[in-house]
C-alpha cells in the first residue's frame, strides 16, 4: 500500500531541473571561461593555508590532507607560486677556488639574477688571458730587458774566463769551452797538441804542463766560485721582470671586473687573490708553448671559473621547492 507521506513529497521529473535562459550568461560555451583555481567548498581550508603561509617565522608547517582527486596539491602549488612571486628573490650563490685551501672552496653571494653574468665575466677574462699570454713575453720591450739580464750574467762569466785564458796562454795552454764544459789543452808552436804529440814531449815538459793545468784549474774554480750566486741573482732578476710584466698586463684585464663588482667585498677579495695566484699560473701554464689552447683553457677553467650553486631570475620571487 503506497505511503501517503511519501506520495505527497514525490517530485515530478520537470521539478528536478532548474530552468534558466542562455541569454543570462556572458559566454557562449564554458571553453570561454577561465579555469576555476580554488577549492570548491573548502573556504576554511583555504583560509588556514593563507594563515599558515603568512607566518614568517621558522618552525611553522602546514599539513594538507584530503580525498584524492580533490585538487588539493594543485591548489597548494599554485598558491605558493603566486605568494612566492610577491616575495623578495633570494641571492645567487657560486663556488670559487680557495687558493689557500683548494679542498675547501669559497662560496660567494651575488645579487639575484647576476650569477650567470659573473660566470660569463670570468670566462671572458680567461679568453683574454689566452689571447694575451704568452704573446706579451714576445714584446720587444720585454725581450730587451730579458736580454739585458742575460747579457749582464754572460759578461761576468766571460770576464772570469778571460782572466783564466790570459794566464793559460802565458803558460802555452789553450782554454776550450762549450755550453757545459771548460777544458785545458797544452799548446806547441801556437796550436793545441793532440795526445800523440803530447806523448812525444820530454817527461819534464809533460810534468810542467800537468802542474800548470792543475794550477789553472784551481784558479778557474776560484774565479767561478761566485757562479751559483750570479745565477741566483740573474734568476731573481728574471723572476722580478716576469712578475712585473704579468702584473702590468693583468691590471687592465682585471680592473673592469674590480670596478663592476666594487660593492661586493667577497668578489673583490676573490679577484685580488686571483691576481696574486695568476702570477704563478701564467709562468707555469701559459708560457709553455707545448700546451694547446684547449689544454690551457681547461687548466684555467679548473682553477678560476666559478661553479653555479643556485641562480634565480631577478624578478622570479621566492622559489617553490618541490620534493616528491
Image (cartoon, rainbow, N blue to C red):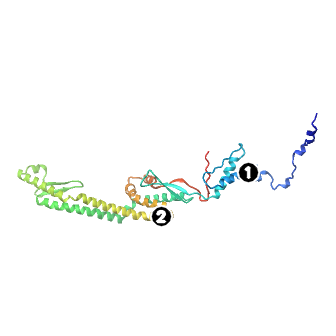
Q: Secondary structure at mark 1?
A: helix
Q: How many marks?
A: 2
Seen at 17% across and 62% down, the residue is 163
Q: Which residue is mark 2?
A: 258
Q: For the residues carrying marks 1 and 2, which lies nearer the camera in this image?
A: 1
Q: In x, y percent, where is residue 179?
A: 24, 55
Q: Marks 1 and 2, how far apart in space?
A: 54 Å
Q: Secondary structure at mark 2?
A: helix
With 39 as the anchor, is 91 left or right in this view?
A: left
Q: Position of residue 297 (x, y in %)?
A: 45, 54
Of the 4 image quadrants, the one containing the C terminus is: top right
- Horizontal side of 197 relative to 38 (left or right) equals left
Residue in view at x 35 percent, y 66 percent: 141
Choose top left, top right, bottom left or bottom right for residue 172: bottom left
Between residue 196 and residue 298, name the one nearer to us: 298
Which corner quadrant holds the N terminus?
A: top right
Which residue is tagged 1? 44
The picture places residue 262, in percent across and down from the top left corner, at 49, 65
For residue 84, which quarter of the picture? bottom right
- The percent coordinates of residue 159 (x first, y second) are 20, 63
The residue under the point 20% across, 56% down is 177
Crowd tier of the residue under label 1, counting other residues whose Cα lies within 10 Å: few below 14, some 14–19, many 20 or above: few
Amino acid at each position: 500500500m503506497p505511503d501517503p507521506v511519501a506520495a505527497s513529497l514525490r517530485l515530478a521529473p520537470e521539478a528536478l531541473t532548474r530552468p534558466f535562459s542562455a541569454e543570462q550568461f556572458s559566454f557562449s560555451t564554458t571553453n570561454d571561461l577561465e579555469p576555476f583555481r580554488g577549492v570548491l567548498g573548502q573556504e576554511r581550508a583555504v583560509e588556514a593555508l593563507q594563515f599558515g603561509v603568512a607566518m614568517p617565522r621558522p618552525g611553522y608547517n602546514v599539513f594538507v590532507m584530503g580525498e584524492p582527486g580533490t585538487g588539493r596539491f594543485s591548489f597548494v602549488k599554485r598558491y605558493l607560486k603566486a605568494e612566492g612571486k610577491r616575495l623578495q628573490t633570494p641571492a645567487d650563490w657560486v663556488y670559487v677556488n680557495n687558493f689557500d685551501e683548494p679542498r675547501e672552496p669559497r662560496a660567494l653571494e651575488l645579487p639575484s639574477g647576476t650569477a650567470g653574468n659573473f660566470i660569463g665575466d670570468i670566462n671572458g677574462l680567461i679568453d683574454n688571458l689566452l689571447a694575451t699570454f704568452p704573446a706579451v713575453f714576445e714584446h720587444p720591450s720585454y725581450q730587451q730587458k730579458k736580454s739585458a739580464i742575460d747579457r749582464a750574467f754572460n759578461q761576468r762569466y766571460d770576464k772570469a774566463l778571460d782572466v783564466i785564458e790570459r794566464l793559460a796562454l802565458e803558460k802555452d795552454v789553450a782554454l776550450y769551452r762549450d755550453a757545459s764544459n771548460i777544458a785545458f789543452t797544452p799548446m806547441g808552436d801556437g796550436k793545441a797538441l793532440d795526445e800523440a804529440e803530447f806523448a812525444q814531449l820530454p817527461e819534464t815538459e809533460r810534468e810542467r804542463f800537468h802542474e800548470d793545468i792543475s794550477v789553472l784549474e784551481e784558479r778557474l774554480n776560484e774565479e767561478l766560485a761566485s757562479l751559483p750566486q750570479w745565477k741566483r741573482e740573474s734568476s731573481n732578476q728574471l723572476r722580478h721582470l716576469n712578475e712585473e710584466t704579468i702584473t702590468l698586463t693583468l691590471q687592465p684585464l682585471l680592473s673592469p671586473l674590480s670596478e663592476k663588482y666594487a660593492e661586493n667585498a667577497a668578489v673583490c677579495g676573490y679577484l685580488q687573490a686571483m691576481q696574486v695566484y695568476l702570477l704563478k699560473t701564467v709562468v707555469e701554464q701559459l708560457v709553455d708553448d707545448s700546451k694547446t689552447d684547449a689544454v690551457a683553457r681547461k687548466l684555467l677553467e679548473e682553477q678560476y671559473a666559478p661553479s653555479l650553486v643556485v641562480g634565480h631570475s631577478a624578478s622570479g620571487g621566492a622559489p617553490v621547492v618541490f620534493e616528491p
